[in-house]
Image (spheres, rainbow, N blue to C red):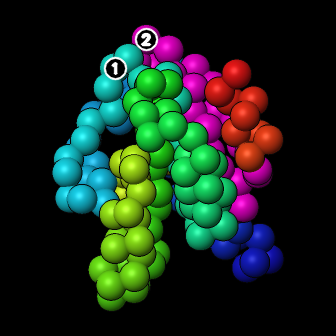
Amino acid sequence: MKRILFSVLLFVATFANALNIGDATPAFEIKDQFEKKHKIASDAKTILVAADKGTSEILRDYFLAKDAKFLTSNKAYYVADISGMPSLIAKFFALPKMKKYPFSVLLVDEEQTKSFTKKEENITIYTVKNGKISDIRYVKDAAGLDSVFK
């Protein structure tokens, strides 16, 4: 019984503040791996969210295989939730590695991460139209990402 109650509470906490269809894109600023502040533009088309190391690696490899301007030209944003990563690991290992990427990775903090829906071992894909979330789906691999950018 306690396990079921805990699962329900975890589910509610995960989705309580998360973006839903019809919501406006987040208005808060998000820093990238270079400490540069970004806002998701009102003309954004896609927001891709990686919530764990595995999904981050899939997105990284996918975007490294594309043109350096791929995200910009597709009006897409790559958001990584590293809030659970120990700060020393982030500072000395993850961020220096990310600084070698030719694209921005928006890094959400513990408060900002609540705005994004997560599903274990999946990349969350928000489709945006006219500054509002029009669809939310999940993909597991590069083939799924290809279907996003057709």
* Circle on res. 130: 2
Say left or right for 99 vs 48.
left
Instruction: Please tell me whether residue 125 belongs to the stretch shown in magenta.
Output: yes
- Asked where in the image residue 52 lies, by quadrant, the reply is bottom right
Q: Earlier in the sequence, mark 1 or mark 2?
A: 1
Say left or right for 96 vs 6.
left
Give the CA separation, mark 1 to mark 2.
7 Å
**Of residues 34 and 65, which is closer to you in this image?**
65
Percent coordinates x, y for residue 143 in the rendering: 79, 41
- Asked where in the image residue 43 lies, by quadrant, the reply is top left
Q: Main secondary structure of the magenta part?
A: strand
Q: Amino acid at mark 2?
A: Asn
Would you place residue 11 above or below residue 29 in this image? below
Q: Amino acid at mark 1?
A: Ser
Percent coordinates x, y for residue 16 in the rendering: 51, 48
Magenta range is 118-141
**Of residues 15 and 129, which is closer to you in this image?**
129
Residue at image point 75% right, 30% down: 147
Percent coordinates x, y for residue 12 in the rendering: 59, 55
Verify CB contact (< 8 Å) between mark 1 and mark 2.
yes
Percent coordinates x, y for residue 101 in the rendering: 42, 57
Local packing at callout 1 (Cα closer than 10 Å; few below 14, some 14-19, many 20+) is: some
Would you place residue 82 above or below residue 47 in this image? below
| Residue identified by numbered label 1 | 42
The total number of labels drawn is 2
- Asked where in the image residue 107 lies, by quadrant, the reply is bottom left
Residue 50 shows in this picture: no
Residue 29 shows in this picture: yes
